[in-house]
Image: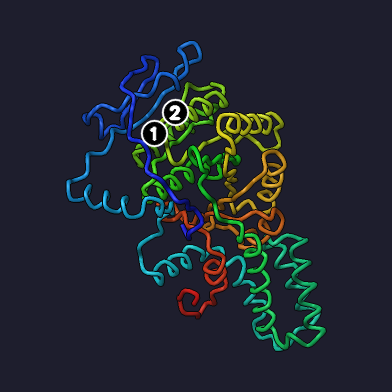
Amino acid sequence: MLGWFKKKFSKKSEDTTAEQQAATEIVAPEEEILQPEVPAIPESVLPSPAEGDVELAAVPPEPEPKAEEAETAQQTEALEPEAQEIKISKDEAAPVSLFKRLAEKLAKTREAFTDQIDSLFLGKKEIDAELLDNLEELLITADLGVATTRELLDNARRRVGRKELADPQALKVAIKEQIKSFIADYQQAAEMVMPENGPFVIMVIGVNGVGKTTSIGKIAHKFVKAGRSVMLVAGDTFRAAAVSQLKIWGERNKVLVVAREDGADPSSVVYDAMDIAIAKEYDVVLVDTAGRLHTQTNLMEELKKIKRVMGKRLEGAPHEVMLVVDATTGQNGISQAKLFHEAVGLTGITLTKLDGTAKGGIVANICRELKTPIRFIGVGEKMEDLRDFDPDEFIEALFQGRSSETKPTA
């Protein structure tokens, strides 16, 4: 995934335990029910019946590779035992078509942002005070935020005063470059590296309705395509729909889902899942969490507890605390992000619904305000519409003029 998720990876032990825990229910996806039985989960890592049953929605193991494939894989391991990198696979379509698709998906966002700038500058031959004042109002209403807009316009006014910007088109280029810098400055820390021991644990947080569970399913798909073993954990035990939705994504991706009954303690579900993930040597664990109103103190305390439980079971976990934000919520999304950041410390952001009525300024504003990298952007309902965030590609697509050719950056 743009090379940000990598690690030299050693071969894992293939030993499995033959014991079957009676208190654990293993449910295969509907289309796989007649396949061979699922390997048993070690008794030592499962909760006792008194603690409550853990439900595992799983899939049978894949068939053994053909002899030729196995021989090729064995030769590769023998020659390069420490050279395997974990990367999220990118879409295989040509760069031009990928950029064109992004530009098309951002059409509504572009209409609410850069097209408005174009209209403001239309027919203008010089930069005057009225143009700058109107531009300031436009940027604030485009969710760039008051502080970010003032910083941008103060810099523009200084450059105009020094005669560095001669006309409105030069001003537009300057605005584009500074917005890009707001984003790119905090993308440099975007690399996520696998821990030396245990799975890579991603704690996903966000309020209800932002597309959190759907984002988890799509992120899981990226890891599966990259050849990683993935576990999903239903930590949102307060909404039956959330658990059901996560199980559907587990079936689509053919990955294990760990869940309990409605109303169970989320921390205990997460602890049990961590035990299983460590024992079974999963590569990635994606943990869904409750998303009640971010202003509720009890939710924040619950998230802090879940984070502590992860850290006690596996040092360094969670390795990523990812906030999912609905880009159409504007400044309210920024307020949400700040409160979550104060509670659990964010390390990455996923922005959803950028194909809707979102105003592009929120991308720069959230980067500048939180100093946190954006991992993914959602620009549609399809699996491939959760895209790895590339600042250069995003800015070029956002600022693409009405008559510009659709082409990627050099």
Task: Please tell me which residue lies in front, 11 or 17.
Answer: 11
In the image as oriented, which residue stretches furthest toward the left? Answer: 67
Kindly report the distance in space between the C-alpha atoms of the residues bearing marks 1 and 2. 10 Å
In the image as oriented, which residue stretches furthest toward the front? Answer: 79
144 relative to 405 in the view: left or right: right
Residue 282 in percent (x, y) is at 42, 37
120 relative to 88 in the view: left or right: right
Which residue is pictured at 46% across the width and 57% down the height? 1
In terms of image quadrants, where is residue 58? Answer: top left
Residue 364 in percent (x, y) is at 65, 62
Q: Is residue 118 above or below residue 254?
A: below
**Contact (Cβ within 8 Å) of mark 1 with mark 2:** yes
Which residue is pictured at 45% across the width and 12% down the height? 49
Q: Is residue 185 above or below residue 404?
A: above
Residue 307 in percent (x, y) is at 62, 34
Task: Please tell me which residue lies in front, 374 or 353.
Answer: 374
SS state under label 1: strand
Q: Which amino acid type is shown beneath numbered disc 1? A: Leu
Which residue is pictured at 40% across the width and 45% down the height? 10
Residue 15 in percent (x, y) is at 33, 31
Q: On residue 256, which mark appears?
A: 1
SS state under label 2: helix
Q: On residue 276, which mark appears?
A: 2
Q: Is residue 254 above or below residue 115?
A: above
From the viewer's perspective, is the residue at label 1 or at label 2 nearer?
2
Q: Which amino acid type is shown beneath numbered disc 2? A: Ile
